[in-house]
Amino acid sequence: MFEGHRYLTRGVAESLPPDLIAAIWNIVDNRKANPHPPLDYLQVFDVVSLTGASDCPSIVRIVNTQELPPHLVVRLCRVSETLNVSVWVIDSGAYCTMLLPHEY
């Protein structure tokens, strides 16, 4: 699961900083490397800024959840922008897509 090509929707490419996109893919890769519990086809990432102003790096909390089997991973990450957002990563078999929920 989560093999093959990776794509971003326009909304992700235009609204998320590259360092946050890389951090989310990194979490997916780390979960693949340790497949217990197995990955669900839908990974949800809730990003919440903990510190920072618009002109300095921000510490964000990234909470990764999945429905089946239930699983939760929390990571802290430094990113270039202050933001609060939910991001989905969907495995479609041959490819994976990172998108914002309203783009589904």
Image (cartoon, helix red, strand yellow):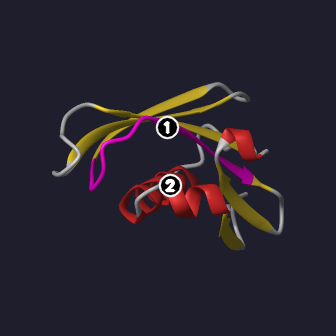
Q: Which quarter of the image is occupied by the C terminus? A: top right
Cα distance, mark 2 to mark 1?
Answer: 10 Å
Taking depth in this image into account, of 97 and 26 the one nearest to the observer is 97
Which of the 4 image quadrants contains residue 58?
A: top left
Please, is residue 4 above or below residue 28 in the view? below
Q: Position of residue 16 (x, y in %)?
A: 47, 55
Residue of label 2: 15
Q: Earlier in the sequence, mark 2 or mark 1?
A: 2
Q: Which residues are magenta?
A: 78-90
Q: Secondary structure at mark 2?
A: helix
Amino acid residing under circle 2: Ser
Q: Which quarter of the image is occupied by the N terminus? A: bottom right
Relative horizontal placement of residue 11, taking residue 40 as reference (left or right): left
Residue that appears at 38% across and 40% down: 83
Q: Residues within 10 Å of mark 2 (few under 14, many from 20)?
A: few
Q: Tell me if residue 80 is in the magenta stretch.
A: yes
